[in-house]
Image: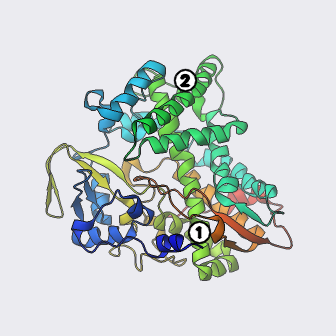
Amino acid sequence: MTDDTINRMDNPVCPASLDEVTLASPEVLECPFPTYELIREEAPVFHDPLTGMYVVSRYKDIRRVALDQENFSNHRYSNDPERLEGNARLAYEMFLKHGWVPGKSLAARDEPEHKQMRSLFDEAFRPRRIKEIESGVAHLAYDLFDDFIDDGACDYVKQYAVPLPLIIICKQMGAKDRDIWQIKAWTDAWIKGVGFGLTREDVIWATEMEIQAQHYFQAIFEELRRQPNDTLLSDLVNNEVPGWGRTLTDNELHAEMMQDTFVGGSETTTNAMAAGIMLLDRNPEVWEKLSADPDRYLATFVEEVVRLEGPVQGLSRIAKNDVEIQGVKIPKGAVIDIRFGAANRDKRHFENPDTIDLERKNAASHLGYSTGVHYCLGAPLARRELFWGFKAFLDNIESFRVVPEKNKLRHLPNYGLRILKELHIEFEAKEKRHRPDNLDEQAATMFQPPP
């Protein structure tokens, strides 16, 4: 392991005062938790001089913002063409000329539009449908090990954490398994395109990639209009939105594909899955305890991974009125950053918040999937993907280690998402490969959703 890697892992940026806080810095984003602790204790509503946002970091305050629809809106200023300038205006004009300007996504809508649009997804994510999907998730979790189990090593991100949720969501959205790496390239480009500090060339590249994705999915939309099927995408394309008197437009569908479906429905689970293995490597006592009794501890481990290494670190709201939080006056129209990653380590809500506790009673109360009406629609599926992914790992791997010389162990410097790009591991497979004979039965009964 290089000295540079050691410094990044073990010596995160620890600002001495609020004047030193730079939340959007790549070095801070690599391990933002000491910075979160400082603002959570000294400025729970931190007016960031760089972004202009009001950063809310305490658990109770974030729940208040997320639940208060009268004072806080999910609207994004990026959906207002008249506000766009610079690189944002450049991307908008490229979409106008060569593709489709993405409409408002589900995540960016307020009530009643949000509830009306969300109803299109309800059938696909009802408990009955999730249970039907779960058997496929469980089988895929074990199938993927067949590709590398005899090698004794793998890049866990590329060979496991990416394909598991991405293949599942591809089936729901009518894409072909063979196209998953092209879709992954498009989601990577989308994520980069919403980052800070982009050059003009970065914006052009990211926008061109998204337009490629739009044309790929546009062909699927048109086919589904001619010949509907039983996929979620067919429902989104063909079903009228209650109260709207119409189906979703192409612009709205394209927003759903990239923002809510492929990034929200696969990328976040990929990131949590990789984070879980990294945490087990760094906490061998947790690995031993979990390995000894996975039936007892696995569901809690899933929650602790999402709590500690939240794939979504924060989302924004807009103040609909002048409001006050923790004595800080926030003017109407201001952008508020509700920092889930900070709330999930708030000692006021979680005892010993920086440690994995497999006995933690309130582990599932984390905000990793948000809360309120915008609680993550795909959370039930994500939990099952994580559960079966880790279960298959425990059933097949006797011991493992992260290989320092093959890993940079750097997270992508993204303000909203926590993304580990690679995780090379070496492992000793169990002498007797374990794949339950009654996997379909287990898939129907083993996973118990948290209360």
At mark 2, the secondary structure is helix
Q: What residue occupies the far bottom of the structure in this picture? A: 285
Q: For this view, does 441 lie left or right of residue 411?
A: right
**Eye-nearest disc, 1 or 2:** 1
Residue at 41%, 21% (x, y): give it. Answer: 96
Image coordinates of residue 399 in percent, x first then y, are: 73, 76
Q: For this view, does 50 lie left or right of residue 25?
A: left
Q: Quadrant of the N terminus?
A: bottom right
Q: What residue occupies the far front of the structure in this picture? A: 3
Q: Residue 78, located in which quarter of the rendered image?
A: top left
Question: Disc 2 residue type?
Answer: Asn
Image coordinates of residue 60 in percent, x first then y, are: 29, 65
| Residue 248 shows in this picture | no
Question: Disc 1 residue type?
Answer: Met
Residue at 68%, 59% (x, y): give it. Answer: 155
Marks 1 and 2, how far apart at CA: 42 Å
Q: Answer whether labels 1 and 2 touch (C-beta < 8 Å).
A: no
Q: Which residue is mark 1?
A: 278
Of 296 and 178, the residue lying toward us: 178
Residue 178 has which mark?
A: none
Q: Which residue is mark 2?
A: 238
